[in-house]
Amino acid sequence: MASPLEDDANKTNWLSFEQIFEKLKQKIDPKEQSKKDKELQERLQAQYAKQQQREAATINSNSTLPVTISEVRVLHATHTRRGFLQRIVKPLLSANKDEPFTLAEAQEEIDHVGRTLEKLGKILSPVPNVVGWMCKSEIRMLYMLTKPDIYKSPITAFVDKANQADPSTSPTDLNVFYTAQERGRYTIKTGTEAGSSEGSAFADVQFRNLFGGAESLSGHASLGTRTKSSYSGLFNTPIFSNPDRRWEIGGLVSSTLKPWASHEERLRGGTTKLKVHTEGGQLHEFGYSGIWRQITGLSDNASSTVRLDAGDSFKSSLSHIWTNDKRDYPLLPSRGYLLKTSTEIAGFGPLKGDVGFGKMELESQAAIPIPIPGIEGPSGISFNTGLRAGMLYPLTAGGGDIPLQSRLNDRFQLGGPTDVRGFKISGLGPHDGQDAVGGDVYAAGGASLLFPFPRVGKDTPLRFQIFANAGRLLALKGKPKDKDGSMSSDEVSSSMRKTLQELGNGLPSCSAGLGIVYAHPMARFELNFSLPLVMRRGEEGRKGVSFGVGIDFL
Amino acid sequence: MSKPSQATSDDTSPRTKPTRSILSIPPSLKRLFDEFPLVTYAANELPARSVSVPNKRDRADIHAFYDAHLSRRRSSEGGGRGGGKGQRDDALHAFFSWAGEGDVSPNVASFNPGCLRWQAYLVSQGIKFHVVPSNNHASFPHSLPLVASHPHAGGPFAQPIITSEGLGKWAKKSGEMGMKEDAFMALVDGPVRRAWLFSMYMTPNFEKLTVPCYIDAHTSSPIIRLFSARELRQAAQAELLKYKPVIDERAIYSDAEDAFQALDSYFSRREEGTKPTTLLDAAVFAYTYLLLELAEDGWADRRLADMVRGLEGLRAHKEEIRKGYFRARPPGVWRRSKMVDV
């Protein structure tokens, strides 16, 4: 019993050291830490808010103060053309205006130019979030930017009184400086991707600000199991220094396996597009594309319908896509709506080519947050509903007088984890044997109720969902009676009427289930369990668990 | 005897065993799942562009075409294979072949000797089919023709799709060819085919006949036509280079001449009354028919045609088949130029 006492006596010296170590080693109580952090944050915020209030008051009280802007400098933009920047800052310079600005107007205008500069990056969120103004001897604007393309984020603007020693300045003159740090002129990215039933390796290269006018050239190459090979190049430039108007031209060579219809599709072609962002955040895309398509590499048990369409065809088409996306978070919306229409006209009149059709598609989605009575703020529960529909109308091509019937490459496919869940990929619609041969008219709808995970909370991109979705995909009704399988224009329109009526005939093919949703910044992942409720003979449902990755979900 | 019972016990054992893998579905749940889908409607209609049996009028034409042959042959020997009585009139095999747009009837000859060979052979065997104009992508990785058999058409085909390779095996099994025929077949598939390839792909015949037949009918796009024509020519060149590392025009033609002469003397000396219904007859006919049916001014390079025109035995052989066994109409591009009576 004596030894422990002795030991204790020996240890007394050490204990004090150990205690120190212990104390150092001891983990800081996370609760206490977070409390401290919170306090600090609050203090900073309060200070910041006060400062902002002061600034706002200063600016407000001086809002009618006449100011003129004599000089605008964009710093660090060494690789950007002068003429390109001139067009952007032109409205700012007082020399281009009859009357001087008021301070408020100047602020507005400086803001506008700053926004334009930053939009020369990727146009994802057209309205930047102005974090604040600071007013000492200068007014500073700070923008939080979303992935600027040619300039690094954030772009800052300083406003300074013009040097009064300079005899050419007037007392109201201000100088504006933008700091636009240019990003590297090129990036190269390589990587590998693995999905549920495919793997691929890719290389991307992007050259920015190619001629000093925010032009970009990007190239993409990938090799994989599903997309056997794909090479594309795209040149993109703003029109007249306007980041809201862009012109794109590109080329593509690819080869993709389409196991649901036992073939491989090779594409070679070019597209050109004009993209216009409107003030209200809508996007219009006008495009032309000329594509040589080849259906080849048929599997041994390919059906006759696929064999009939095997070979070459040339599609020459004009298209318009209108997108109005007002969802708060497109991959996992809790509020807002999406409306998108696509129109394509191929082969008609001077377009020529081997196929002729008019194609119209509508896509819509709405998300409504559902509040829980008794709980303040958003509950994280939301109701999502989506509707898609499309029609392919046969038209004459290349000056012919008989409308051309649709081909396998142009027809719609429906079914799979990203549209009508509970069905195999392209599991809906007409099937010839094992092959999904596609249809000319479709309609699909879905509804899902999303709940946050208990414990994990509503702020994580993880949700639990219950869903039901339905769809129909139909080929144009009525076989051609003519010898060579053609229908006259009148027959086509009556067939289309019959087909549209058929959409409402009987219950649509549908399924229901539940699952987990995870919205990664790049894509949305879903793991669902579902059962098909209504089907057509030949359609391929999927009972049980299925996994889906995608960007657009119904 | 014990096998079936063993199998059944194997089937039931996983259900009774308590150590079930996590992935297997409990039987009660499986029964529940089997209830789904709750409603199943009739199948969706296929799109307009799908292979369907020709309409009534065309079917009548096809049957009349066969009947003409069969009655002729019945009068001489009595009955052919395949098209027996009581067969449904829409039960026709689909013969995917190089053919002009809209040529669904088997009486229009294919412009491709490989396809025409099988077309003539199947007709002479009384196997009823309708033609689906097609291209080599449809029969990947083999070349045309390809037969999609009709389940109710009876006949010799068991599988749903029969490639050109499958047709060769089937013909071999029916065993009408002896050693001699095999040797002559080698002449057709060797020197004659090479001369045809050279004549159709390496001479001005390419632009005048081959491109309109093989490419222009399939696409209206000048770009695709240009690239496809180049690919087609390169493929023919590669095929010729497989035989010899140099393409020697004179050797190709003189080899072909020898081969044609050998075939000519074989057919001339063949026993009187031999039916020209073997695959060799069809294979030779495929070349001689295409070479002789086109008017002289239809050729841009008529060396090969002239070669056959000078051989009495081959001309008679072609006429015998054309009159008695395969009353074909020449392909579209051939019809465009004036016909010559040989």
Image (cartoon, rainbow, N blue to C red):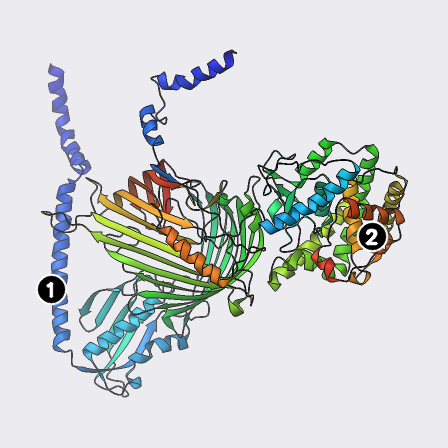
Question: Compared to A543, does A392 lie above or below?
Answer: below
Q: Quadrant of the N terminus of chain A?
A: top left
**Secondary structure under the numbered disc 2 in the rendered image:** loop
Local packing at callout 2 (Cα closer than 10 Å; few below 14, some 14-19, many 20+) is: few
In the figure, residue A6 lies in which quadrant? top left
Q: Which residue is mark 1?
A: A50
Q: Estimate the x, y position of residue B242 in percent, counting from the top left.
A: 75, 46
- Asked whether A144 or A416 is in front, the reply is A416
Determine whether label 2 and label 1 are within 8 Å by CB.
no
Image point 9% across, 47% down: which residue? A374
Q: Is residue B224 left or right of residue A181?
A: right
Image point 69% across, 44% down: which residue? B66
- The CA span between labels 2 and 1 is 94 Å
Mark 1: amino acid: Lys
In the figure, residue A207 lies in which quadrant? bottom left
Q: Estimate the x, y position of residue A318 in percent, counting from the top left.
A: 46, 65
Q: Which residue is mark 2?
A: B248
In the figure, residue B39 lies in which quadrant? top left
Q: Is residue A432 left or right of residue A459?
A: right
Q: Are marks 2 and 1 on the same chain?
A: no
Q: Is residue A138 left or right of residue A416?
A: left
Q: Inspect this view and state whether residue A124 appears.
A: yes
Question: Compared to B301, does B276 lie above or below?
Answer: above
